[in-house]
Amino acid sequence: MAAVTAPLAADPLTIPRARGFRHRWYRTPSFVAGLVIVGLMVGLAIAAPVVAPYNPDHQDLEHILAGSSAHHWLGTDELGRDEWSRMLYAARVDLRVGFLAVLFPFILGTTLGCVAGYYARFADTLIMRLVDVVVAFPFTVLIIAMVFVLGPGTRSIYIAITLVGWVSYARIIRGEILVQKRQEYVLAARGAGLGDRRIIIRHLLPNVITQAIVFSMSDIVLDILAIVTLGYLGLGIQPPTPDWGAMIADGQQFLTTKWELSTFPGIAIVITGLGLSLLGDGLADLLRAE
Amino acid sequence: MNDPLLEVRDLRVEIPLARGVVHAVDGVSFSVGAGEALGLVGESGCGKSMTLRAILGLLPRPAEISSGQVMFGGIDLVAMAPRPLRDIRGRSISMIFQEPMTALNPVMRVGEQIAEGPQHHLGQSRRSARARALELMRMVGIPDPVRRARAYPHELSGGMRQRVMIAIALSCSPQLILCDEPTTALDVTIQDQILKLLLSLRKETGVAVVLVTHDLAVVAETCDSLAVMYAGEVVETGAVGDVFRLPRHPYTLGLMRSVPDFDVVRDSLASIPGTPPDLVSSFEGCRFAPRCQFAKQDCLAGTFPLRVAPGGRQTACIHDEECAEAARRDPVVSSA
Amino acid sequence: MDLASYVLRRLVQMVPVALGVTLLVFFMIHLVPGDPARTILGVHASPQRIALLHKEWGLDHPLWVQYKDFMDRLVIHGNLSDSLIYHESARALIIDRLPPTLWLLGYAAVLSVVIAVPLAALAASKRDALRDQTVRVVPLVGLGFPAFWTAIMLLLLVALHSGGFFPVGGYGSGLPGHLRAMFLPGLTVALGIAPILIRSLRASLLNVLESDYVVTARSKGISERRVLVRHALRNGIISMVTVLGVNIGFLVGGTLVVEQVFAIPGIGLLMINAIFQRDFPVVQGITLAFAIMVVLVYLTTDVLHALLDPRVRFD
């Protein structure tokens, strides 16, 4: 009854899971699609001064409210300005402000979320009450009211979005930290006598920040929508700098005669939103499967 | 032997996943007679829960039955259309689940949930179904049933909830109840109560039971016969007493050796070395061979279906005599 | 704990939030760069007018006194300052223009549910099937639609071609008039929130459909329709109410520009006009009004949730 101790040939093979973000990103369709779209928009925006056939202020007085032609791919507006060029330059501004505007709420919200989640009790209650107060106002209304009060222009946009937008990040980060701080690696770090700040920054943050990053994609969409809405109302990016929202507003009076003026900038906004949403979804898929 | 009530023939369940197709149930066969209690034992992941769910056609997507038959009253349930299969569920065959907290609808009063079956299958009016529910609650030992019937699941204790599940399973007087680890999620003392309840109900109603569990002690207490599963296959069947005294498969032997038994004093607590195989792969030879102390060269190739062994038993092991010898010399259980 | 004490507890929890809201609204005037009175009245305002406004708003007093006066006026008189343009109380103006906005919000809420629920249910009924993939595209594309642009597109594509059936603007008169006039505006706002609703509802429905108690229900052999209605839906509605309530902020926010595009005489349009006329008290008042609406909706959602879900009260 000798037992066979040597390992046998029939050892089943487990398929190793493709590891790492680097190996999988190009196989996630939503991520790739999003990257392509956003890349295209950003590329066009950056290259605007080179790619745009005209200056956005250039008035071609012989072609006012013209239809599309070889000279003007998307036609011209009531001042003879080339639509296509204006859209490219508007992309430049709207995308730049939109991407930048997400940074400050991200930083502020993450910091406050860390404090609330980690130190809990008093700090948590205070910060969460603050969240409740901000959340009691409709996002758009508060932004518009603040920009009104602060005065129109890009600087007000940044301030308003920061003061209102930090809330979502704070909630997300706080939630994640509350979960993570019970994990063993945190207890181990504490047991080793590491200071709070070090624990938060070096240990907790890298684990919780992914959720915030995924959210920031959809936050950029929200910010761009807020920016163009302000532009539509004349409170946002001021003329002569072109802005998609302002372009739609300008074109509204010509709805029956030249509907393209109000339509195309909107399509650009939708495409940007689509690209960013896809990117966010793809990112979420990738990060979740890790 | 008269016709079995339920006969599972070479049942196979596949789960297509991203990493490959998992053969969760890979050729399972067993039968249950009327009024009989069969224990289906094995480690987690061996496919016993899937088998049960496959019988009633309740596999979670994307799992599917790929082949095999489930004969009940002369009809193959696998080949049955959804409507007639639905008529059997709850009426002729019912099921009890492992987690009573999540298995009961949180926003529906328990009395309503018990009464649902009779209302639908037996065409009872609301009032008579409610009366039946109260009667069932009394039968399963729920005190103060009138008040308790109006309670929501989260207002009851774990043991109470499991009794409700049992009441639901009995509500249309089925011929067979499938139990998926009914006591695993409960405290030890409550486990005991529930098992005793199941025993007495069996005696009262003559219902047949298939009891899935990883706990051999439960099987010993409540079942007439048992089937042992490993890596998606049934490796041994037989009457409970026979199998416990004389296991004819090394896995069964290993299982029994690893359970502490207060009657037999042993030097050490044995455990089966190694881990169960990944069910995505295909196998060369006996699946248990890598962990088996009796394995030889002829175990490494070929297939090993169940074959008849002496004493109304079945085993998949070709060296079952050696195994039985080992058990005889070093008994697992102290007495007959 | 019963319903009454639950409601009471929530109300008490709301008090600090309410205070915070009033503080924020109060502080708006001090966010203005420079001298608030001068900035608001504009460059051409005479020193006398500026001094008058200073007096009226008590801008010379210390901050806490100003806040006390503000709260006095608000809580005791239910009023804010007078509108700079119309010379009547901001409150009267707001209340006067409230009905169209409420109509718009109600219509939009109903339409959004009508759109989102069937689509979410369709998607959840067969996970990852073609119908699911198709429905999932909607939020991806839909979230990028600016409300004012959707409004303009609807104007262009529907109103202008409908021969007056859907008016291009205005509130309409009488019930049928309102229903017709507010349809496109309501649809615009609904389309703004529908993508979020579809996404959340689909997720909750999937959660419910894959839960253990649905398996139990199926194992009873009852009809699939009964499984869906009595078991899945009951639990799904709870999350739907919560999702709708939580996203009310976006619903409300959309009304501003929609009222502008469709010229609906509600408080959204009032606010935009007030902004252009630099009528600060009105802007302040409407901001506060919106906050009150949102908070009331949150409260209602909580209470509804407690009513529908028996687990809640036993917190």
Image: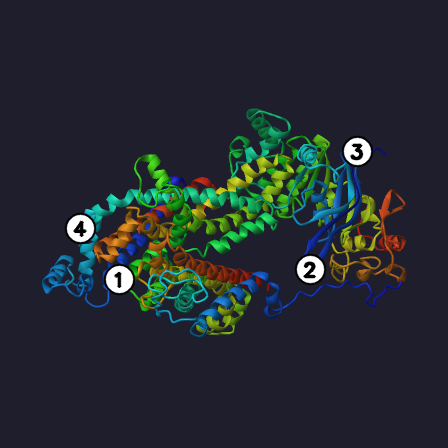
Disc 3 versus disc 1: nearer the observer? 1
Q: Which residue is mark 4?
A: C86
Q: Nearer the viewer, residue B26 or B20?
A: B20
10 Å neighbourhood of mark 2: few (<14), some, or many (≥20)?
Answer: few
Say what secondary structure mark 2 lies in.
Answer: loop
Left or right? Give the position of C177 relative to C281.
right
The subunit letter for the residue under badge 4 reads C
Q: Are the residues flagged by discs 4 and 1 in contact, CB closer than 8 Å?
A: no
Tell me the kind of residue under disc 2. Arg
Cα distance between the residues tagged 1 and 2: 57 Å
In this rendering, is residue A235 above or below C113?
below
x and y, in percent, of residue B185 in the image: 62, 48
Q: Are the residues flagged by discs 2 and 3 in contact, CB closer than 8 Å?
A: no
The subunit letter for the residue under badge 3 reads B
Tell me the kind of residue under disc 3. Gly
Q: Nearer the viewer, residue B209 or C87?
A: C87
Residue A240 tag number:
none
Q: Which residue is mark 1?
A: A149
x and y, in percent, of residue A239 in the image: 31, 66
Q: Are marks 2 and 3 on the same chain?
A: yes
Cα distance between the residues tagged 4 and 1: 20 Å
Q: Which residue is mark 3?
A: B74
x and y, in percent, of residue A47 in the image: 46, 73
Say what secondary structure mark 3 lies in.
Answer: loop
Q: Earlier in the sequence, mark 2 or mark 3?
A: 2
Cα distance between the residues tagged 2 and 3: 38 Å
